[in-house]
Image: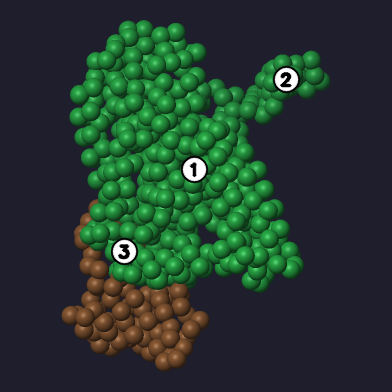
Chain colours: A brown, B green
Amino acid sequence: MSRGLFGNWRFRSTRPAFAPGEEIRAYLTGFDPATGVGTVRIGDTVLQVKGAAAGQVDQLVDLRVESFDAGRAVGEAVLRR
Amino acid sequence: MNHDIIRFRGGKAVSALPVLFFIAWAIVQSGLLGIGDTAGLIVGMLVGLVLGMLLVRGNWGAYADAVVEGMAQKVAVTAIVAWLWAGMFAATLQVGGFVNGLGWLADALGLGPALFPAVTFLLAALLATGIGTGYGTVIAFVALFFPAGVALGADPVLMFGAILSGAVFGDNLAPVSDTTIVSAVTQDSDVGGVVASRFKYAIIAATLAFIAYLAFGFASSGAMVDGDAAALFRAQSDASGLFHLLPIALVIGLAIRGRHIIEAISAGLILAIVINLVFGLAPATDMLAFRVAADSWAAATFGGWPLVEVVPAAAAGVGGSLYDGPVGFATLAVLILLVLGGAQVMIRGGGFQALQDWLLRKVAKSVRSAEVTMVSVTAGINAAITINTAAQIAIAPYIATIGKRFNLNGYRRANILDANTSALGYIFPWAGGVLVGYTQMQALVTTYDWFTPAMVVEPIQAWPWVFHGWLLVAVFLFAAWTGFGREYTTDRISKGGSSA
């Protein structure tokens, strides 16, 4: 739903932060067939994703954040389904 | 669908040949030769598609399939449907004298030459936002506001820039604008959502542009004053045209509430027709007329019936705003389908992938550089494809892929895409928006005795004065750099994006 004409008048970080346990939906932006680990890049924040498949790149996936290092803007997440 | 890879003699880059040939054709035709004819661009795309096929290795079947596959995309059909509805609506407001109503308002407020460019920008923006066609706005305002403003002593170049700026504002923000619809559909978003989210960029640029037109208006006013022109302006103006603010408000309101564009515009169209008939703003035949040839059996039998006009044989045909409005988009519709066919060849041939990989690997290394790349690539493609909707459709898949790789949500992607195509489509001297205004302006010389060729603004003179266009690009470069208005998919998923 739209938030109206005066929504989101703000400056958004290049490195958004997430909390462990947080459930998010985002595009899977990469997959390494050698390690079987997927990547979800949100701005300049990078989450390593377990349980993803190569065919899911550029698809929306549901994730649960497991850990997050706000200083380096990196974390780990698992596929929820 | 056939997903075969098409192999070209000379490698993947050759798959871009049909589109590049079309771009070169557009530059030569509209840029060098000064022919702003959309149907001519269709020939360029057709020839490019034929030439590209000659360079395919082996079977031509996959190439032909790719062309048809590209043309059959839902995005094109959705856009064309919207143009047809918007075309009927815009033309019906025009026959109802909406521009004359705006003229009355300007006169009632006692506008002088210093204020005229700034107010022209506001009113052009209002009209373009209501009817969604920047080209229509440019034509209407060059016909009515431009001579009046010049006659009152406003700077012609500043007046033309203000009109083009208003068209940019409307093309960018209007729910019924073809570019607004294309930007939403290609980026998995709803029209209401993109309009609401792009308001902030548009209003910041417009506020600064308004101030600039005021400042330059005061600095340059008083060059010449013509009493005849002022009288003419008042004679054409009529407050009753302002009744058409009601259907415009209805369409905008329904569109922002997320109603389908066919529903919203149909409702507005019916209201506009009722207003035209009830208040006598336009006879029914101004909206729909069956013009039968005099001396024919049909004229003898049906002459005098409602909606039937008897005309000389050479003028026979269907007419009225319900005809003129959508028919104007038919040529553009065919061009869009063919450009999408050419783009699909580039996708199947690997040229698209190669360019996208290069941008992602070498240029877009952070979200900030990705957004700056999206702004500049979108702006740049308009230099080549002078019809801004066509440029937007060609670049839309790149914007979608680059943006998704940084999880920018559909609204942010749509806003970057639309703002920069809307702006540059009225800035480059060979842009369609500039050329339609120039064409209309040349006609003024024969329309008014007092309008001299020296008052005509050449396309090459206009570009520095399209303040809203330049400021919109500047606002987006600022937004890309600072993160102003940025939204990720984790902040909000655009409506229409959940199944992507």
Work out whether mark 2 precedes mark 1 in sequence or the reverse, and give the earlier one.
2
Query: Pointer 1: what residue?
Result: B386
User: Which residue occupies 51% across, 81% down?
Assistant: A55
User: Which residue occupies 46% across, 27% down?
Assistant: B438
Q: Distance from label 2 to label 1 (Cα)?
A: 34 Å
User: Secondary structure beneath disc 3?
Assistant: helix
Nearer to me, B60 or B439: B60
Work out whether mark 3 precedes mark 2 in sequence or the reverse, and give the earlier one.
2
User: Secondary structure beneath disc 2?
Assistant: helix
Spot occupied by residue B225 in the image (x, y as percentages of width and height): 29, 11
Q: Chain of mark 1?
A: B
**Is disc 1 surrounded by few (<14), some (14 to 19) or many (20+) residues within 10 Å?**
many
- Which of the 4 image quadrants contains residue B303? top right
Q: Label 2 is placed on what type of residue? A: Ala
- Which of the 4 image quadrants contains residue A37? bottom left
Q: Distance from label 1 to label 3 (Cα)?
A: 26 Å
Q: Up-down: is A7 above or below B47?
A: below
Q: Label 3 is placed on what type of residue? A: Ser
- Which of the 4 image quadrants contains residue B251? top left
Q: Label 1 is placed on what type of residue? A: Thr
Query: Pointer 2: what residue?
Result: B314
User: Which residue occupies 80% across, 19% down?
Assistant: B296
Query: Pointer 3: what residue?
Result: B369
Q: Distance from label 3 to label 2 (Cα)?
A: 59 Å
Q: Residue furthest front?
A: B10
Spot occupied by residue B353 in the image (x, y as percentages of width and height): 51, 68
Q: Chain of mark 2?
A: B
Left or right: B315 in relation to B89: right
User: Secondary structure beneath disc 1?
Assistant: loop
Q: Up-down: is A57 above or below B128?
A: below
**Mark 2 touching mark 1, by CB under 8 A?**
no
Work out whether mark 1 precedes mark 3 in sequence or the reverse, and give the earlier one.
3
